[in-house]
Image (cartoon, coloured by chain):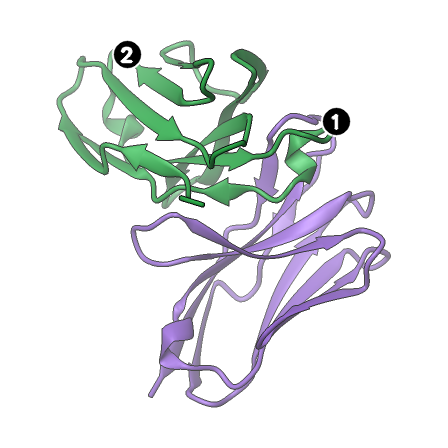
Chain colours: A purple, B green
Amino acid sequence: KQEVTQIPAALSVPEGENLVLNCSFTDSAIYNLQWFRQDPGKGLTSLLLIQSSQREQTSGRLNASLDKSSGRSTLYIAASQPGDSATYLCAVPDLTDSWGKLQFGAGTQVVVTP
Amino acid sequence: KAGVTQTPRYLIKTRGQQVTLSCSPISGHRSVSWYQQTPGQGLQFLFEYFSETQRNKGNFPGRFSGRQFSNSRSEMNVSTLELGDSALYLCASSPGTGSTSSRETQYFGPGTRLLVL
């Protein structure tokens, strides 16, 4: 059974510092990996989807890397801003279910201090 | 395009009651999935619908049910509410054009916050 882990559970950085968020998965046979952002009490916003054939995906200040062999993905956020404060979750499609089901990590709660 | 919308945004119910939540997917999206989010369990998959058919169901009791209409809008129903049903309920839509909707980018709505007293 696929297990998705995000460490640390919480992170605080000063404004301007680069953020590095980690996501680990136990079964490397993933189809893709998606990163989401969630603001308190709100829904999830899709940030990046990286296909298993890709090594990285970039969008603005965000860069996600994927290393299937080691079961890891890393989300980099350059030059963090207070508006980046949120919980970041990663998710992979469940291997045993094709329809709709994503397996989520527990998330990393990020606070960027001014 | 408008995003995924969910109504109502907040609900307070008492134990034993039932509740219906609604989700309107992004225009053109045919797959709708539902998740329950709690502090203790995180995000857990409830079910997925495509073209009015439930294709997948998570490990939840039969009190949790759903349906999808011909316009792809979906509803979920929880009967005989329990305190443990208090959660944020999220729905997600995807185009459903691929053979497996879980492999598509999932777009989430703002959620419905349910409090059971």
Q: Is residue A70 left or right of residue A103?
A: right
Labels 2 and 1: the sequence-earlier one: 2
- Give the quarter of the figure containing the C terminus of chain B: top left
Name the spot of residue B50 as percent of width and height, x first: 57, 19
Numbered label attached to residue B99? 1
Q: What's the residue at 24%, 18% (across, down)?
A: B19
Q: Report in which chain the residue with disc 2 lies.
A: B
Could you tell whether A74 is left or right of B27 in the image?
right
| Residue A31 position by quadrant | top right
The disc labelled 2 sits on which kind of residue? Ser
Instruction: Note whether residue A24 is visible.
Output: yes
For badge 1, the amino acid type reads Ser
Q: Which residue is mark 2?
A: B79
Residue B64: give x, y in percent of width and height.
38, 15
Report if residue A64 is visible in the image: no
The residue under the point 18% across, 32% down is B11
Q: Residue B53, labelled with which disc?
A: none
Distance, label 2 to label 1, CA atoms, is: 32 Å
Name the quadrant containing residue A71: bottom right
Q: Is disc 2 in contact with disc 1, using a CB cutoff of under 8 Å? A: no
| Image quadrant where one finds the N terminus of chain B | top left
Q: Please report the residue visible at 73 percent of the width from the left and 60 percent of the height from the top.
A: A72
Q: Nearer the viewer, residue B75 or B73?
A: B73
How many residues crowd mark 2 within 10 Å: few (<14), some (14–19), many (20+)?
A: some
Q: Secondary structure at mark 2?
A: loop
For label 1, the crowd category at 10 Å Cα-Cα, with few meaning under 14, some 14 to 19 and many 20 or more, is few
Image: B53 above or below A27: above
Establish whether labels 2 and 1 are both on one chain: yes
